Amino acid sequence: MNSLLFHIVLLAYLLASLTFWFHLGLRRRWIYQLASGLLAGGFVLQTVLLGYRLWTQTFLSWDHVYAYLGLLSWAIIAVYLITVWRYPIDALGAFIVPLAFLATAVSGVPEIIPTTLPAAFRNLWLGTHIFMALLGYAALTLMFCAGVMYLMQENQLKSKRPGALYYRLPSLSLLDDLNGRALILGFPLLTQGIVTGSVWAKYLHGSYLHWSLTSLPLLLAWLMYALLLAGRFALGWRGKKAAFAAVGGFVVVLVSYFVHAL
């Protein structure tokens, strides 16, 4: 059941990613609706899969970084669905859904034999820590996509002959607003994840700061986005500066996560 559901979810996310890109090029409403249906179906099945693994307390290579990517892909789609309910940005799916697909695909790399969930991972406090941190990363992934779209749209506006993409992407003001709101959502969630994680580290290791492979990238992410938050709301970073900061910060955090997790 694990393997079957995983591959169905992976296929649904792949088809949704491709269909969102077709919609970005063709701008047909039925294509967007088809992509949204594929994505929603995949998300429901992934929720069932994660629920099944929690119920049976079995995960695939849980101690490896790839296991967290599966949870992260679910969080990215959840944040995206909430966002498009509030911001009807049709083009957003073409940018964020492929990232969720890649995270899902990579999470299945070490899939060999299901392993029992370690007793330490069954603690509710640690579960809260992981959930908060992943939602924070998902919100910051949304911020990254908004930043990429902002830079692309600004480039189109500065061009003497804007291409077709100019008419596909939303306004700069809307993208900048989404960028800021994603930061406001993601940073507190990331902070809560670190706080709950430090309490868990105290319980498990006797120290609030446990320099493990997973805590280092999380702390680095918090420091970087704290600077971004201060720059945006204290120094007046808006528009292009905020977009560059969102893209650059996300790339650095992503690279550091894999470097420390390997």
Image (tube, grey):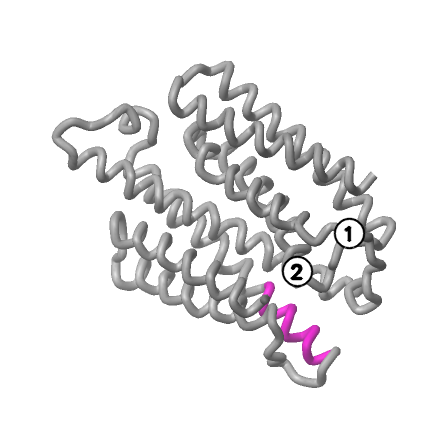
Q: Give the residue furthest to the bottom.
A: 206
Label 2 sits on a secondary structure element that is helix
Q: Residue at x 69, y 80 (%)?
A: 202
Q: Is 1 displayed left or right of 249 in the figure?
A: right
Residue 35 falls within the magenta-colored stretch: no
Q: Quadrant of residue 57?
A: bottom right
**Where is the N terminus found, in terms of image quarters?**
top right
Give the distance between the C-alpha atoms of the residues marked 1 and 2, in whole angstroms. Answer: 24 Å
Q: Nearer the viewer, residue 220 or 131?
A: 220
Q: Nearer the viewer, residue 67 or 235?
A: 67
Residue 196 falls within the magenta-colored stretch: yes
The residue indicated by pointer 1 is: 112
Q: Quadrant of residue 177?
A: top left
Q: Is 188 displayed left or right of 74 in the figure?
A: left
Place of residue 122 in the rendered image (x, y in percent of width and height, measured from the top left): 81, 62
Report crowding for label 2: few under 14, some 14 to 19, many 20 or more residues within 10 A (C-alpha).
many
Residue 124 lies, with reference to residue 87, above or below; the image says below
Tell me the kind of residue under disc 2: Ile
Place of residue 90 in the rendered image (x, y in percent of width and height, measured from the top left): 44, 27
How many numbered badges does the structure rendering display? 2
Label 1 sits on a secondary structure element that is loop
Prevailing secondary structure class for the magenta stretch in the rendered image: helix
Q: Give the residue furthest to the right.
A: 56
Magenta region: which residues?
Answer: 193-203
Tell me the kind of residue under disc 1: Ile
Place of residue 117 in the rendered image (x, y in percent of width and height, measured from the top left): 82, 60
The residue indicated by pointer 2 is: 130
Q: Is 188 displayed left or right of 156 in the figure?
A: right
Place of residue 68 in the rendered image (x, y in percent of width and height, measured from the top left): 65, 56
